[in-house]
Amino acid sequence: MVSPNPWLILPFALLLGAMALAPVTAPRWWLRHYAKVALGLGAFTAAIYLLVLHDRASLSHAAHEYISFLALVGSLFVVAGGIHIGVKGSATPLANVIFLLVGAVLTNVFGTTGAAMLLIRPWIQLNKSRVMAHHIVFFIFIIANVGGCLTPIGDPPLFLGYLQGVPFWWVAKNCWPMWAVGVGGLLAIFYALDKIKFNRAPRRAAETETASEGWTVTGLSNLFFLAVILGAVFVERPVFLREGLMLAAALGSYFTTPRSVHVANDFNFHPLTEVAILFAGIFTTMLPALGWLNANAPAVLGAQPSPGAFFWGTGILSSALDNAPTYLGFLSALLGVTGAREISELLAHTPAHVLALSVGAVFFGAATYIGNGPNFMVKAIAEQNGVPMPSFLALILKFTVPFLLPVLVMVWLLFFRG
């Protein structure tokens, strides 16, 4: 990969800054113009690589990764949108914990985007008599982020790592202790918080919470298409056969799902379109940043950085930026520090570092609304259903710092301090 002038990182910084600030400070302007911003900055960087640096290889590699990323996220989004879970009645704090735990497991099959879109409306309905901000925030923490740490399907950073050469089952084999601590810690905190809120609820509402009137699930034929997508993940040759199978499964799901199911899920392609456009810009503009990190990692991180440095470094930037490109950036940095040429060399000699940046990217993606793609989607759906959600800063001060940060520190102390 070419190491370009550091000034070429500016489009990447501008795009990520716009993604962080514009939806909060100028939401209407951003809704109208985000595609122009993302694609314009991406086109500028692509032109530099083609016409100035003459580095078609890096651009081609990024395009391949983008197509593979979008094929997985998009197909899981469509299949999840074809399954509707109907909920009647409401839930006790214990039932809520069970729901979140099941969701954390399902996230590794449907992906964070698919699981979030599948489960957020049933979650709101389940707690309809007393749904509050903490219900949605912990849903974001657990189902839209931390829960997806067991498979490359679970969260976009891990899938990008899989495309780079991290074996599929390496993630599950090595990440499960962190997953157990992270999910377990968040569930314990949620239960204590929800129990307090539950006990303070009006008596009539509290009595309603204990009623369970039955659940319904429609669109189960989409499990076949889900199986096709999961099988396609393991297809490596010929080029784009994997992505073609995922697209075929998405089309099959969309055209065979009854319209009533899509209506019940309020299914539309706007969230997927936004992700596709923004990540087209991200995957292109991040090329100079990746090249610079790869060439200058020893000077930035030191000659022998600890796993903890990668956990906190990847994590903090994942919460301020998006965790998928941040993961690739630090993976590139680790290659630069170690001098390794292949991911297999990293896994053989510095597996703790790869594990630290993997867990950091996934877990810290929950810290802000911009840390991971599904976070904003969940927030928007909650607000459409009348749930008052904290602002960008309030989320950090009221939930991330007091509830998520202690869990992150515990994971660091147990696994990455040394």
Image (spheres, rainbow, N blue to C red):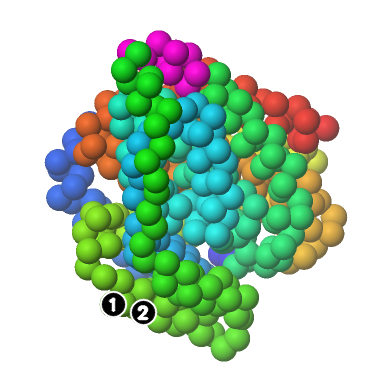
In the image, 134: left or right of 236?
left
Q: Residue at x 41, y 37 (%)?
A: 212
Quadrant of the rendered image containing residue 316: top right
If the image is split into quadrants, where does the C terminus sit? top right
Quadrant of the rendered image containing residue 152: bottom right
Q: Residue at x 27, y 40 (%)?
A: 380
Q: Residue at x 70, y 26 (%)?
A: 410
Q: Can you tell which mark lies on residue 308?
A: none
Percent of width and height locating residue 187: 58, 30
Percent of width and height locating residue 329: 57, 51
Front one among 341 and 327: 327
Q: Can you tell which mark lies on residue 252?
A: 2
What stretch of residues is rendered in magenta?
194-202
Q: Is residue 195 magenta?
A: yes
Which residue of the protein is positioned furthest toward the bottom in this rendering?
Answer: 238
Front one among 161 and 252: 252
Regarding mark 2 in the picture, which secondary structure is present there? helix
Crowding around mark 2 (Cα neighbors within 10 Å: few <14, some 14 to 19, many 20+) is some
Front one among 250 and 262: 262
Percent of width and height locating residue 215: 39, 49
Percent of width and height locating residue 245: 47, 81
Examine the residues drawn in magenta and state their main secondary structure: helix
Front one among 44 and 375: 375
What amino acid type is highlighted by mark number 2? Gly
Residue underneath mark 1? 255
In the image, 71: left or right of 376?
right
Mark 1 touches mark 2? (CB < 8 Å):
yes
**Res 40 visible:** no
